[in-house]
Amino acid sequence: MNEYDCIVVGGGISGLVAASRLGRAGRSVLLLEATARLGGCVHSWRPTRDFWLELAAHTAYNSYGPLLEALADRGRLAELKRREKLGYRFVAPDGRLQSPIGRLNLFEAAWSLPFGLGRPKAGHTVAEWFGGLLGKRNYRRLLAPAFAAVLSQPADSFPAEWLFRRKPRMREVPRKFTFEGGLQGLLEALTQGAPFHVGFEAQVRGVQRSAGGFSLDTGEGPLTCRQLVLAVPVDTAAALLAEAYPEVARILQSFPMASSEALGVVLPRTACALPPVAGLIGVDDDFWSVVTRDPVPHANWRGFTFHFRPGRLNREEKLARAAAVLGVDPAHFLHVTESVNRLPAPGVKHPGRAGEVDALLAGQALSLVGNYLNGLSLGDCAERAARETDRLLNL
Ligand SMILES: Cc1cc2nc3c(=O)[nH]c(=O)nc-3n(C[C@H](O)[C@H](O)[C@H](O)COP(=O)(O)OP(=O)(O)OC[C@H]3O[C@@H](n4cnc5c(N)ncnc54)[C@H](O)[C@@H]3O)c2cc1C
């Protein structure tokens, strides 16, 4: 007899949306999270009682339907906080701040657009498709650094079909939003009074197929379930499935990962003369991007997260670079933290491989959700989790 109808492994957005939907459908659900914190790539650092700063994902949109549905189930939709509309600036190699328009060659864009519009994205890299849309020079000067900032990794080889997919919008909520305590607060809200249990600091080390489902090793005796949802990074999923589903694991092993190093700094509003911006984009710089707290302004503090390229600078060098970009003395940084983010780095063949994974899992009580089978954004993850949950519920 299985202890649970369903175990969900991983407490990021993918696992939380899946657990919410399975629990709502009346299944007995246990969600296991390896760390003491929910969120995964949604990581709101809270250095003081009333200030938070996003160390990874920062913006959610009203097109993220299944995420909003899960929040509506908890009766918390009205608590969404609007993010103010602010622009992005490029940090040119000479240190000047430039607007996106300042880096756009209008003549090249006007020449390329009629040929670039309406072409299918499938089978094309971001560099090919967007280079065809605005022209190669515009791609190099404007789009390549902007997309690398979005993905926190080089974007050229990324599959074009997995970047900026259009989804229906829920007009009654703000177009861009966050939550009390940051986006992590939103994910935490999904578990409050939720129809599923959460086990923290429960790292799953092994998955075995058993008579009526699965047996999971967490180091504290086996846990059993009829259906299993893996909502972990792709390399972890590959390792966990190596024995139970070797063919699937082999495909997952072909998905590379990229990392970036986040440095979060908080300083008094009065110390920094930089005008309010949503973020800064590095051009051939040590960082891909800087994400600010300015769209959700605080009366006393400003916060900036620098997403550095991995392995380039040590902590002191990062602090010096951050201070130079912000035009302040590092002594003004009242709170500082560091963390590492990891994301898949798929190429143009990976959407096809995701299709192969789905074909192998058709009819199976195992579901893979996450940011490597449908695109990286929170909306893509939530959409995948909703689709896979419906599949499990219909088995
Ligand atoms: C720097 C950065 C900025 C981003 N900005 C945005 C943005 O603004 N908007 C947007 O839409 N998207 C953004 N994204 C993308 C998005 O945040 C991620 O793709 C998404 O959050 C991934 O969610 P997930 O649940 O699939 O995986 P993860 O968030 O990686 O969660 C996986 C969870 O599984 C747990 N886990 C791992 N192994 C085990 C195990 N063995 N047992 C139990 N638990 C385990 C982990 O601890 C983790 O909590 C950003 C990502 C990064 C890194």
Image: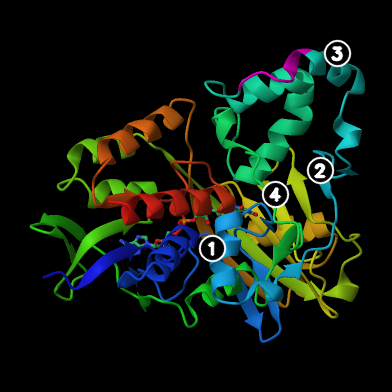
Residue at horizontal 86 percent and vertical 32 percent from the top: 103
Residue 174 place in picture, x, y as percent = 76, 62
Q: Main secondary structure of the magenta part?
A: loop
Q: Position of residue 303 (x, y in %)?
A: 75, 68
Image quarter for residue 226?
bottom left
Q: Compute the Cα span from label 3 to label 4.
A: 29 Å
Q: What residue type is labelled 1?
A: Ser
The residue pinned by badge 3 equals 111
Q: Name the residue under label 1.
A: 339
User: What kind of element bears circle 1?
Assistant: strand
Q: Give the range drawn in magenta.
A: 115-120
Tag 1–tag 4 contact (CB < 8 Å): no
The amino acid on which the numbered mark 2 sits, given as a three-letter code, is: Phe
Real-space CA distance between mark 2 and mark 4, rounded to the nearest whole angstrom? 9 Å
Where does label 4 land, which residue? 289
Q: Distance between the residues labelled 3 and 1?
A: 43 Å
Question: Residue 134 occupies which quadrant of the picture?
Answer: top right
Give the residue pinned by disc 2. Answer: 90
- Camera-side residue of 298 and 336: 298
Residue at the image position 60 percent from the left and 24 percent from the top: 121
